[in-house]
Image: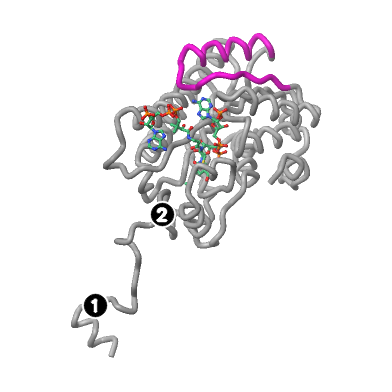
Amino acid sequence: MSDDDFAQRPTALREGAFAGKVVLVSGGGSGIGRAAAILFARLWARLVLCGRDAGKLESAGTCLARLGADVSTHAMSIRSPEAVETLFAEVVDRHGGLDLLVNNAGGQFAQASIDIRPKGWNAVVDTNLNGTFYMMQAAARHWRDVARPGCIVNVVAAIWRGMPQVAHTCAARAGVVFLSKTVATEWAPLNIRVNCVAPGTIRTEGFGNYSREARASFSQANPTLRTGDAWDIAQAIAYLGSDTAGFITGETLNVDGGSQNWGDPWFLGRPEYFELNYAEARLPENLEVQVQ
Ligand SMILES: CCC/C=C/C(=O)SCCNC(=O)CCNC(=O)[C@H](O)C(C)(C)COP(=O)([O-])OP(=O)([O-])OC[C@H]1O[C@@H](n2cnc3c(N)ncnc32)[C@H](O)[C@@H]1OP(=O)([O-])[O-]
Ligand SMILES: NC(=O)C1=CN([C@@H]2O[C@H](COP(=O)(O)OP(=O)(O)OC[C@H]3O[C@@H](n4cnc5c(N)ncnc54)[C@H](OP(=O)(O)O)[C@@H]3O)[C@@H](O)[C@H]2O)C=CC1
């Protein structure tokens, strides 16, 4: 899907639903974050994008400005608590405050958990769990200090049956889900809602990090036997971030084509051990009798 497609795709959300609201999307330069930013621009939000790669952010910023959005871009890493603090100071300075934080930045590399080294484990947990927490905490402190309501949507993953070959990200995303449930209660008195969206396999630029075999498994990893696209996730994010979802907090919305129930994505390809061969399967003797 291209920017132009996302600028045209139908959406259930009301035009102007985010008029006057400031929305911060981390990882807004590509994939799901970029699609979400385009949707928010179409709903009249003012936008803040952050990510590490200034070039990606600039390109997304140009696209959003073309759609008429007031947008600022900030090259930084969510892994640095100091950079997060600076980001929020810049947002307040430039936009006067924040209404919705979309924690979409994240990622991982595929590796058997038995081989993951401490630096790699820490890099993934630091981005997906710690970085997400720094952003959530900075947003909550801002809303507490200015006595205004706020809303957070965290993009996690469909972790419910484990994620073989990306154990680090599975552990980190599980952390974010339960962190979200926890602070949804703690921060309710501050009028802050906190929810998650759990994507299944969604074809984005991020797929380029995986082998052809892995990508083939992604497209058959749910009962619909296809991948989702960034617009599917963008709409779920916008719904949970909107006033329409005002009575929803501490929830995780799965947008996964049913992968919770059936399907197995393999980030390095399916190991031979898991290749099923019903024709040659040996049946237990008593079952053999019933079958005859
Ligand atoms: C559910 C369906 C599908 C889901 C799809 C998506 O999510 S798509 C969307 C998601 N998009 C993405 O996932 C985008 C890509 N992912 C990222 O950018 C990740 O955030 C990151 C953590 C890999 C980069 O963090 P960073 O900048 O800190 O990385 P760094 O380069 O400095 O490495 C630090 C250490 O990590 C280790 N290590 C790293 N790579 C590999 C590897 N291939 N192999 C083995 N190990 C690897 C290594 O120990 C390395 O240290 P070393 O040995 O080099 O001294
Ligand atoms: N596509 C899929 O199938 C699924 C995706 N997800 C998750 O959805 C989110 C979006 O992924 P997707 O759009 O597919 O892939 P992308 O790789 O396009 O998006 C990841 C984004 O995160 C940003 N990012 C990564 N690390 C940091 C950091 N330390 N600080 C700031 N920004 C960072 C990247 O920007 P930059 O490079 O500029 O830093 C990039 O824009 C990710 O969290 C991903 O893991 C979850 C399940 C499935």
- Mark 1 surroundings: few (<14), some (14-19) or many (≥20) residues within 10 A: few
Q: Position of residue 33 (x, y in %)?
A: 61, 34
- Judge by depth and name the residue closer to the eye, 29 or 42: 29
Residue 130 drawn above or below residue 8: above
Residue 86 drawn above or below residue 259: above
Q: Position of residue 99 (x, y in %)?
A: 63, 23
Task: Say which residue appears at 59% left-offset and 19% top-offset.
Answer: 75
Which label belongs to residue 207?
Answer: none
Is 183 left or right of 31, judged from the image as shown? left
Which quadrant would residue 22 be assigned to in this image? top right
Q: Amino acid at mark 1?
A: Arg
Magenta residue span: 71-94
Residue 56 drawn above or below residue 75: below
Mark 1: secondary structure: loop
Task: Say which residue appears at 41% left-offset and 45% top-offset.
Answer: 159
Which label belongs to residue 269?
Answer: 2
The residue carrying mark 1 has its beta carbon less than 8 Å from ligand 1: no
Residue for badge 1: 282
Of badges 2 and 1, the one in the foreground is 2
Which image quadrant: the C terminus? bottom left
Task: Say which residue appears at 55% left-offset and 19% top-offset.
Answer: 76
Task: Say which residue appears at 47% left-offset and 55% top-offset.
Answer: 213
Is 67 left or right of 105, judged from the image as shown? right
